[in-house]
Image (cartoon, grey):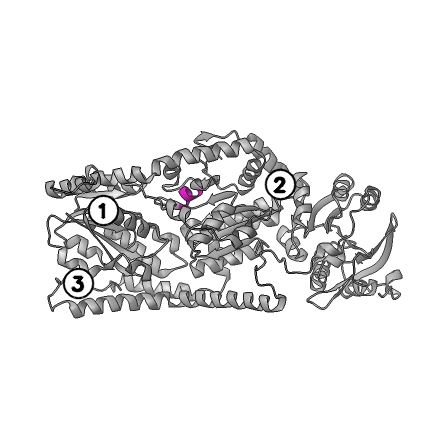
Amino acid sequence: MRIHQLVARLDPGDAISNQALSMHELFRSWGFESHLYAFDMDDYGKRFAEFDNRYRRFMHERDDLLIYHFGIYCDNHRYFLESANRKVLIYHNITPPEFYDPYYPEAVRLCRMGRELMPRLKECDLALGDSDYNRRELVEAGFPEERTGVLPINPPLNKLDEVEEDRALLRRLQDGRTNLLFVGRVVPNKRVEDVVKLFACYHYGVNARSRLVIAGMHLATYQTALLSLTERLGLLDKVHFLGKVSDSSLKACYLGAHYYLSMSEHEGFCVPLLEAFHFGIPVLAYAAGAVPETMGGAGVLFEEKDYPLLAELLGRLDRDDLMRERIVSAQYRRLEDFRPEVFAARLRAVVDRFASPAGGEKAQAAADGREPA
Amino acid sequence: MTIYVNGRELEERGLVGKSEARKRAGLYPEGLLRVLERSARDELADSRCAMVEEVQELNRALYESGAHLEPPPDLAREGEKKGRLESFLRRFQTRFIRAVCEGYVQQQQLFNSYLSKGLILCFLQVYGREEEIPLEGESMPDPGALRHAEWERETAEAVAAALRGSSCLVLGIPGLELLEALQEKARLVLAVDPSEEVVARAQARMLPAWCGTRFADLLELAGAEGEVVLVTCPAAIPAGGLKELFVWAAGHLPPGGRVLVALNAPSPGGIVDREGGSRPYTRAFISSLMRSRGLVAGERRLDGKVFLEGRKAEDGGAGEGGGAADAGGEGR
């Protein structure tokens, strides 16, 4: 059986790209013929994928499996609509357009069109969300519930383990100050301004020896607003916007961080939470979207943004080693649910639903490490 | 507010109590709380980003009139002649539209990137350090080198006694005894110091202290009001900062309000700051700054420590200086 994956864009550091690549590797390791297609890609993406028009030669093959990663409007969805393959949709969630409203017209347009498109994609064999939160959105959009499921993200933690940390950056972070960290795209739904506000209360009220590190590609207009707020708060020399960082710098950020903060008001999964879990950093997160589900009862969750109170909580964590250790232990336990083997088993179960007897036998043989009959 | 730690509800009364205590102590002044209520959208509305709104309005109008910018589908099969050109045009059209929409964003990012790189290069050229770029102004002349030694308890008590009953702002923390004495005998509104260590120690004792070097900006942010501004170590403030401080004081002090500037010579030797001020400042320089802002300059001695006192006229208007300091003062 051939398995085709279709994405809007393939580039490093993006959660959807990482997910598609990890699936691609697994499919190949199981002996399937696997192809990745993208509407757009950078040089990194070109190492793994082809442009999506190359998929046309397979779209009338009834035995093939097409997996469409849906996270933004892209006109390559038309291949998915017209394809005769058996079809699986993986919904990574689309940010409600209103978040982008005053900042980025193009994103507003693409998100709005993506959300309008959702009901039209329901004619598929299986629709998966990478969280139950996403799955429920599929059902709300008209997908038959019995044909929906959950396939969580496979966080690329081993990739961070393998890379060597940026030592210069780490040395600077390990200077005795308490480092608060946010990782992710600096976009409006992540509410980075609220991270800055919480830091302001922590810095002015609880611990002057502190800094905030924000690592992630930024949206210029939103960044302008953030810088303006940061300056108004007198914190331009305490808040560090690093922009998009390499894996080695990202690792240094995690190794040097004392707390991870998430104030996001919309998340379909949120991989950085698990990365922070992996590096043993206590996570404090606002309970919105799929965040509570991803955290799975570990870490600190709150339902209101009372900045002075949360700053006080950070101060308590500074002093209470036991509480911090309990949080980190629970986070490590939660991480067990996202082990690569668990993900592989879940993905295999999905593929086996569609594998033809021959394809399945071949795949099983490959998985068992023997030559297929 | 409910907080869950590892899925269990946290007993938060203690946290609420401490947070309220910090508010009462003045660590979260009204000015700061007002800024916390501002959204990023408020900031955007105040900045010059009107072009974004124009582009969005245009897109919205096009969309609502049915002129969708996404091109028509291309489902021609591989090998069919029909569709190749369409496919090319479709991709080109889409990318062109996106390029136009995103162009200004990209340009701004490029500009920011080049500017940052330029700044780093200049820094390396000027300071000749090749290994690291400072994160928190490590390259600045260390104001701590010009700090006074911590004040004796007796001095702190004497100063606090002299300011009895007044609401005070303290710039430069010469030890926590002064802050505690002021809290007891006067009313300490806010203390600001460039040293994170000193401020962190004050915060741990719930004393209203902030860390920073741009004193006037911080006082503005805090919305702080007081009857007395006590500057314990003027040499730690750049000349520009000192000027801003007197502008702030002239605008915010009530009639009869005072600025007290400690004059003890610090050690070791002075520095010339970027604004051209030679620190430690002369008595004449400080008194002229006071007079230029309408404060009546005079001298006070408290427990052997000499202060220049600038008093705002009772009628709130500008006054002409007099007193010992105005007689000429000591040059260095």
Residue named by callout 3? B74
Tell me: A112 left or right of A214. Answer: left
User: Can residue B37 be seen here?
Assistant: no
Q: Name the residue under label 1.
A: A27
Location of residue B68 in the rendering, given as x and y in whole percent from the top left corner = 25, 63
Q: What element carries label 3?
A: loop
Q: Do labels 1 and 3 share a chain?
A: no
Cβ atoms under marks 1 and 3 closer than 8 Å: no
In this rendered view, identify the residue nearer to me: A347 or B315. Answer: A347
| Marking on residue A243 | none
Total marks drawn?
3
Task: Tell me residue A354's x, y (percent).
Answer: 15, 42
- Residue at left 68%, top 38%? B205
Query: What kind of residue is marked 2?
Result: Lys
Of tags 1 and 3, which is closer to the observer? 1
User: Residue A170: where, in percent of width, then height?
Assistant: 52, 51
Q: Is the magenta stretch mostly helix, strand or loop?
A: helix
Residue at horizontal 68 percent and vertical 42 percent from the top: B201
Say few, some or many: other residues with alpha carbon within 10 Å of mark 1 (under 14 / 14 to 19 / 20 or more): many
Residue numbers of the magenta segment: A272-276
| Chain ID, mark 1 | A
Label 1 vs label 3: CA separation?
28 Å
Residue B177 on the magenta segment: no
Q: In this view, does A216 lie to the left or right of A207?
A: left
| Residue sitting nearer the eye, A283 or B19 | A283
Mark in front: 2 vs 3: 3
Residue at which label 2 appears? B23
Which chain's residue wears label 3? B
